[in-house]
Amino acid sequence: MRIRLFTSLLASIILPLLQGADPGLLNLLPPEAKVMGGVDVEASRGTPFGEFVLEHVSAAGGRLDEFARETAFDPREDLIALLVGGAGLGRNSEAVMAVRGRFNVPVITEQARAKGAVVEQYRGV
């Protein structure tokens, strides 16, 4: 009885949150993902929390500015939503971060390859 009550309570809390999650990003998470969290970055920008995060990210400055120049992607302006999911919370747990944003794919791909990255598709993306 307790397990059923706990499961119902948990579902009533979590399901409404997931209904607001970007379905395209949810589909990119591995099927074994048990833990997930995300942010609608675009909607959060004008909130006190969003302004707090932007202020602290901008204070870090240098490397992020260099990244934005090299890739033509500035997360402070071009990131729309992000979702992180994984199989657990342990120190060695694997996780996937899926993001929606305004990307200049050819520039990002070129810069990634120039820095030695291997570029490949994942689930058609």
Image (tube, rainbow, N blue to C red):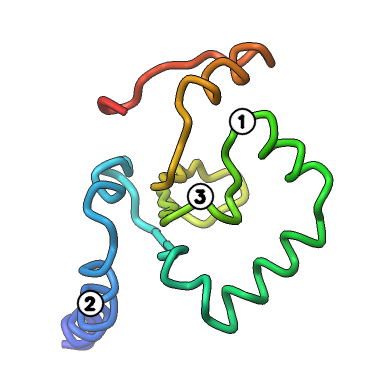
As measured in the structure, the alpha-carbon distance from the residue carrying label 3 to the one carrying label 1 is 11 Å
Residue that appears at 16% across and 82% down: 4
State the residue position of label 2. 16
Q: Residue at x 48, y 44 (%)?
A: 95
What x and y, as percent, mark residue 34?
34, 55
Residue at x 42% of width, y 62% of height: 38
Residue type at numbered disc 2: Pro
Query: CA separation, marks 2 and 3?
Result: 27 Å
Q: Check if mark 3's residue and mark 1's residue have beta carbons within 8 Å.
A: no
Q: Is residue 37 above or below residue 11?
A: above
Location of residue 53 by image quarter: bottom right
Q: Nearer the viewer, residue 107 or 20?
A: 107
Name the mark nearer the viewer: 2 or 1: 1
Asked whether, in this view, residue 103 is left or right of residue 68, the answer is left
User: Within 10 angstroms of label 3, few (less than 14), some, or many (20 or more) residues?
Assistant: some
Crowdedness of circle 2 by 10 Å Cα count: few (<14), some, many (20+)? few
Q: Quadrant of the C terminus?
A: top left
First of labels 2, 3 by sequence position: 2
Residue at the spot of label 1: 71
Label 2, label 1: how far apart the Cα atoms are: 36 Å
Badge 3 marks a residue whose secondary structure is helix
Q: Secondary structure at mark 2?
A: helix
Quickly name the residue at label 3: 78
